[in-house]
Image: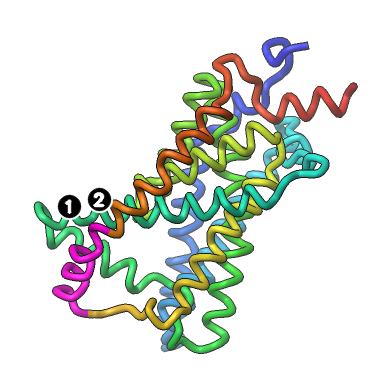
Amino acid sequence: MTPENINNPFLHLKVRSLLLRLLLISFVLGLGLGLIQATRELNFNPQVLNLILYIFVFGLLCLWTLADFKRLGVHLNYIVGQLPNNHRWLPMVGLVILMILFSIGSYLVLFYILSLVAPSFVDAILNDVAKSPTPQRTAPLLFNLLGAIVLVVVAPITEEFLFRGIILQRWASKWGIRAGLLGSSLLFGIGHANIVGLSMVGVILGVLYIRTRSLIVPIACHAMNNSFVVVMMLLPSASKTTSAVHRLEQLRYSLWFGILFIVLSLPLLVSFLSQNWPRKDAVIPYFINSFQKES
C-alpha cells in the first residue's frame, strides 16, 4: 500500500487557508480588545497583552484546524506518532545547543551586514525585538512566568503542530518531501526576526520529525531551545538597552562572536543533515504511522 492509492487528507489542508485564518483570528481578537479598551477605558500592559494574544491566536488556529480533521478524515495520532523506544535525548541536547549557536551567529552576522546598508531598518527590527514579550530580569514575576509558559510550552506545541505536522506534510504531498521540508522551514524562519537562523532550526526540526515520525521529538527540542532562550534573557548580561545608537554599536561589536558561533556550529549541523537528509521518495510520517497502526 502506498500513499498514491490512499485518500491523502493533506491535499485538502491548504496552507493559504491557515494563513487566512491566522489573519482573521488576529484581526477579530485585536478589534475586540481595542473596543474593550475604548469603551471600558482600560489600559492593558502591551507585553502581557501580546503574550495573551499569542496564546489565543495560535490556540484557536490549532483548534480550528483540528475541527477540520473529522471532515477530512485526518487522524491526529498519525500526525503526532509515538516516541521511539530508547530514544537518545543527550545527543538532542547537543543538537539544540548547536542550533542556538548558529541562530545567534547568523543573527549577529546578518544584521551587522544589514546595519551597514540600512541602519534605520535594522534599528526598527532591533527595537521590535527589544520590546518583544520575553522574560526579562527586571520584569515582574508573573510576567516572566507567563512568558516562560508561552515560550516553553505553548509555542513548541502549536508551532510544531502547524509547521511540521501540517505545513511540511501538506507541501511534501504536493511537491515532494524535500521541497516540503525546505518550504515549511523557510516559512518558519520568515515568521521570526532571524530568518536565516530560524530557517535552519526549522530544517533540523523537520528532519527530526521525518526521521523519528514523532512530533514529540521536535516539540521537545523546540522547548529545550526556548528554555535556553528564557535562561539567557534572565541573566544579568541580557539586559536590553533602549538607545538606537547603543543597539547598533553593540551589534557591530558582536560581529566576531557571530562568526565564531557559525564556524563552531555549521559544520556539525551540516554533518547531521547530510546523514539524515530524507530520500527524494521518502514517505511523510503520517502515512508511515498509519501503515504501522494497520499492520
Judge the density around disc 2: few (<14), some (14-19), many (≥20) Cα neighbours within 10 Å. Answer: some
- Viewer-closest of 159 and 92: 92
Q: Amino acid at mark 2?
A: Leu
Say whether marks 2 and 1 touch (CB < 8 Å): yes
Determine if the magenta segment contains residue 250: yes
Q: Is residue 156 left or right of residue 74?
A: left
Res 63 seen here: no
Q: Residue at x 57, y 85 (%)?
A: 142
Q: Which mark is residue 110?
A: 2
Q: Which residues are magenta?
A: 243-256
Q: Which mark is residue 44?
A: none
Residue occupying the far left of the picture: 117
Determine if the magenta segment contains residue 216: no
User: Where's the C terminus, which quadrant?
Assistant: top right
Judge the density around disc 1: few (<14), some (14-19), many (≥20) Cα neighbours within 10 Å. Answer: some
Res 97 seen here: yes
Q: Is residue 16 above or below residue 58?
A: above
Q: Is residue 4 left or right of residue 184?
A: right
Q: Residue at x 76, y 38 (%)?
A: 81
SS for callout 2: helix
Residue 82 location (% of width, % of height): 79, 41
Q: Amino acid at mark 1?
A: Leu
Q: Which mark is residue 114?
A: 1
Disc 2/disc 1 C-alpha distance (Å)? 6 Å
Q: Is residue 236 left or right of residue 242?
A: right
Residue occupying the far right of the picture: 295
